[in-house]
Image (cartoon, rainbow, N blue to C red):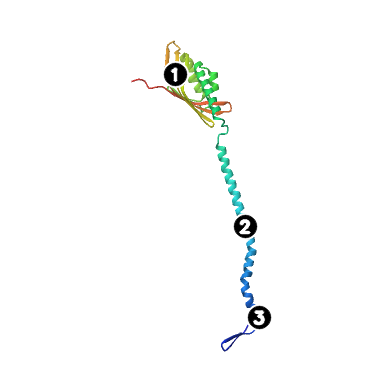
Amino acid sequence: MTWILTGASLAVSGAGASLAGRSRSPSQPHVRVADRGGAGAPYAATIERRRTAMNVRRTALVGAVVAVVLSSAPVHAGDEQADRKQVQQQFEKYLSSVKGADLVLASEVWSQTADVVAVTPFGRFQGWDSVKTNIYINFLQKAFSERNLESTNVAIHVNGDTAWLVFDWTFTAKLSAGQPMASKGWESHVYRRTPRGWSLVALHYSVPPPQP
């Protein structure tokens, strides 16, 4: 295109081509916008796919958290009132096992596991075999010809698969040589739910300190 200056006016040779070129110039941005619009469809699809993937991951994370919470809940936790009654029955069986120094009855009360523990004024005994030998045989059977254990102020608490019980006790007995004796104290039990029911896994009892 040749630009020709005549006086104060500006003429353009090839005016038709120039006008045509000028008429197209304003339309170029619209053409480019249209082009970007065409490229925007795949971009929008990509954003949507990413958003969907994030939602899926978020849903999976929530599901995992819920699963962990549910798995931490007691699997066998039942009605608390029924559990308390069953623990009470085991406790009464325990009292009978002491009165009779009964190994068979005691084995129905105590857990038959190595983590069982009994803490007494005359020793600490770990495992059912040790409890059976030192408390039921050497103490209850050999030291006494008669024995009776009575409880008062019994309190039972249940939390899932664990229960604990505390009470005050009075023990009256006759020594193997025939002398009567009596003592008082406090005792606490821990019971664990097992496939065979509630089992005693921990015992601790104490007596008042000697009079000065």
Residue type at mark 1: give it.
Answer: Thr
Residue corresponding to mark 2: 46
Is 21 located above or below residue 99 in the figure? below
Q: Are marks 3 and 2 in contact (CB under 8 Å)?
A: no
Q: CA distance from mark 3 to mark 1?
A: 120 Å
Residue at (62, 57) in percent of width and height: 46
Q: Which element type, helix, strand or loop, lies under badge 2?
A: helix
Residue at (64, 60) in percent of width and height: 42
Is residue 47 in sight in this rendering?
yes
Residue type at mark 2: give it.
Answer: Thr
Give the quarter of the image for residue 12: bottom right
Front one among 208 and 151: 151
Q: CA distance from mark 2 to mark 1?
A: 79 Å
Residue corresponding to mark 3: 17
Residue located farthest toward the bottom when viewing the structure as drawn: 7
The residue mark sitting in front, 3 or 2, is 3
Is residue 112 in sight in this rendering?
no
Rendered location of residue 185, percent (x, y): 42, 21
- N-term-proximal mark, 3 vs 1: 3
Q: CA distance from mark 3 to mark 2?
A: 43 Å
Residue type at mark 3: give it.
Answer: Ala
Residue corresponding to mark 1: 170
Q: Quadrant of the C terminus?
A: top left
Rendered location of residue 57, percent (x, y): 59, 49
Is 2 located above or below residue 132 in the figure? below
Rendered location of residue 96, percent (x, y): 51, 18
Give the quarter of the image for residue 74: top right
